[in-house]
Amino acid sequence: MDRTQGQVDPAEPSSGPARVVTLTAGDFTLTVNPVDGSEIEPLRPGAERARSRRRDAAGRAARDTAARPPVLPGAPASARLTAAREEERERLVRLLSHGRSVRLTGPSGSGRSGLLDAVAADCAGVAPDGVVRLSGYGQQQPGELLHALYAAVYEAPDERPVRPDREELLARVREIGAVVLLDDLEMGGAALDELLRATPECAYLLAATPDTKAPSDASHLEEVFLGGLGRAESIEFLEAGVGRALTEEETAWAGDLRFASEGLPLRFVQAAALLRQRDELNGTRGGDEDEEPGVFEERPRDAAYVPLPTLAEGAAPAELLASRVSESARAVLRIACALGGELPHHAHLPALVGDTHADAAVAELLGCGLLTPVGTRYRLASGVARQLEEVGYGDPAAEEARTAARHYAWWTGHASVTPERIAAEADAVLAALAGADVVAAVLLARTAAPAFAASLHWEAWERVLRSGAEAARKAGEVAEQAYFHHELGVLALCEGRLDRARAELEASIGLKGALADKRGTVAGRRALALVTDREAAGAAAVSPPLRLAPPVGGAVAVAAPVGAPLAAPGPLAATVPVAATGPTGPTVPVALAAPVGPRASEAVTAVVSARRDAPANLAEVFAEPFPMSLKPSPAPALAPPVARPVAGSRKRTVLLAAAGALTVAALGTVVALAVGSGEEETPAGPGPKVSSTTPDVPAAGTDTAGEPGGNDSAGDPAGSGAGSGADAGAVTEAEPGAATPGEGAVAPTPGVSRGPGAKPSGGGTPSRKPPVVPPKTSPVASPPTTSTSPKPSSSPSASVTPTPTPTPTTSASASTVTGTGTGT
């Protein structure tokens, strides 16, 4: 079997293995394998991509024939336009000849398709690429229409079908110059604008219904509206369909029908069929009155006169017309109702109906006005499906859909059927797939999907894959479900939808892993690797490159280390030199400044050269505005080792200043406490007594030469005495046992109060009780105090008072302090 075109080898049976087609899809080579799933790989380096060529005159003629509905057996139906439609035809041809695009708007049954056929014949030689007929039925996005236009103008090479990617597609369709007749348009707005912008050299004739979304104001389309026929025109049209002149009764009936149907030509086509059927029924009775009817004749022996249809029957004539057609035609109508109005190709009807002459039923139904052409096929006319379903034609829909699905599953899987023929039957296949049971749906989707892929009809390919995946899930067919997910992932990868491709391929790999399908898992992982490569390439392409620009107005803002000072805001901010530091120490200094010139949104990254005259550390930065001495220090060297000594000397200076401040504070506290104790010893007026809980110790006026009146040093945590009783409270010069400021001084504990005669030094707190041993010198008299403390102990503790002792001020003079503490 030929792997490219899918031809049947004579040695193989008629229903041999399915075809394997290799095609080019953008930058990928796609091998459609119906057995194991499609395989995708990038084009080999150096391989020339196949390029489609334009069709010649013969190719355009063959293309136009293939774009029209098939020719039915029997006498062709005559198509004739009225005088009103002739005027609209001339107007449309004139607009299209001047390159204007037109939107032809009319209700269903207004004769839009017949008018397009007449216009196509007049515009055959207007454009270089001729006339292109497209069908917009079921098309909501312009992508598939652009691919259809590309396939109509360009012919694929013989060796391999080609489906271009979006960039190449837009580039090729921009060169097309043709008159495009787009029937049954279903999109508008932005989608229609995209279609028109992609093909600026094409003139469009867009046929749509009034309920279709309107185009935007930027489309600049001419509007032509199709209305109903007038009274004279409707009678003329009806007489042409019947083939004779109307009687007065029929003329009056035609006038009422025009009023009820708003003059739609489709209603008069159906009315003409009703009159023809009536003539046949009444003519057989009147023509052969003396002859006896034969045994095999369908004519009844006593035929009654058939009157004119009622006005209701004329407005909705589907039931009456179907009752007067052949049995094969009624079976075809039941199949069409089961398929949602879609009619299979007439070559399939003998197998579906079971009658060898069922293909002639299509011409019969078309002559009755029950069918209408849509693209390359036929379907039930507007309103016919609803009228037939009301009288029971849709009852066997499930059985008819199942029969059609099984028939199409056999037909699409046959090796003698080309993918192009299957693509032409796509709508009927999809309708059968939607109405069939899950088993028949899985079988049909499995055989039809590779054919749609090979025919480049990828919208139908995606729809059949999604329907098949849902049917396989319901039926519990894990292997088929994995196949459909794999194909959906490959399709999404070819179309550039990477997120969807990754999701579908991962689902397929998981299902195939559960089935231990090693070959399928490998194929899925290969496709997933391509997705990863495309994502990486896309991320690199989307990321904006680094843009280097020279500094604007001098220095440009650059990244600075943490803790580095920033320049003051403003357009003329001065440059602050700072050294760029790293993990191993200071490095080459750089310049840091606020951006000058462009705004934040216009700022660019710039490369700034290193400055050789910048300071090396922070100490040098602040040395000039905050000098440590009056004598300016020389500028340090740029070598990194110079930075450490300067920083260390400044640190020691700061520590010494802090120590001095603490010393001054401690000295002030000592002086304040001494002043307070001296003032308390002076006799004062009556006031509240303050009780003390301090232990009894010798008086403060005793001698310190190892006598009992001396200070006890057990309470000094530093182990040094604070002075003698003769100079208690006075600040004298440093002695060997005295505490120096900043070293042995102990700050008073917050919340702990001393007695009235307490000593501010770190020694024990003296008491006012009389001394045990008489002192050598007379002690200073002190007011008696009431003590509640126990006997003296070796470790006296500070007294705790319920009320805080007021802190004396340090405004006392030195003489007062000295006089108070001297007892000799």
Image (spheres, rainbow, N blue to C red):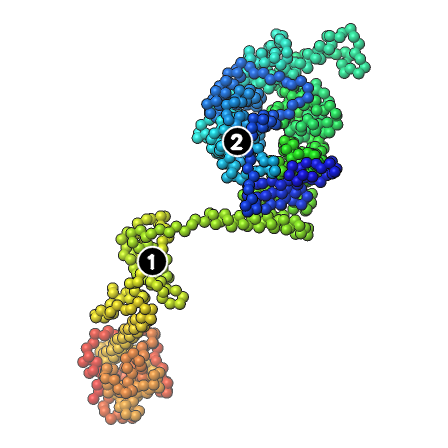
Which residue type carries mark 2? Met
Question: In the drawing, what numbered circle is on residue 753?
Answer: none
Q: Is residue 60 above or below residue 653?
A: above
- Residue 598 in percent (x, y) is at 32, 48
User: Farthest top residue?
Assistant: 290
Residue at the image position 31 percent from the left and 51 percent from the top? 552
Residue at the image position 77 percent from the left and 14 percent from the top? 300
Which residue type carries mark 1? Ser
Foreground pick, 771 / 373: 373
| Residues packed near mark 2 inside 10 Å, few (<14), some (14 to 19) or many (20 plus) | many
Foreground pick, 295 / 54: 54
Q: Which of marks 2 and 1 is in front?
A: 1
| Residues packed near mark 1 inside 10 Å, few (<14), some (14 to 19) or many (20 plus) | few
- Residue 521 in percent (x, y) is at 64, 50
Q: Is residue 353 left or right of residue 366?
A: right
Q: Mark 2 points at which residue?
A: 187
- Mark yes or no: residue 133 visible: no
**Quadrant position of the C terminus in the picture:** bottom left
Q: Name the residue under label 1.
A: 609
Q: In this view, does 200 lie to the left or right of 649?
A: right
Mark 2 lies on a secondary structure that is loop
**Quadrant position of the N terminus in the picture:** top right
Cα–Cα span, label 2 and label 1 = 59 Å
Foreground pick, 91 / 485: 91
Q: Residue 717 lies in what quarter of the image? A: bottom left
Mark 2 touches mark 1? (CB < 8 Å): no
User: Farthest right residue?
Assistant: 295
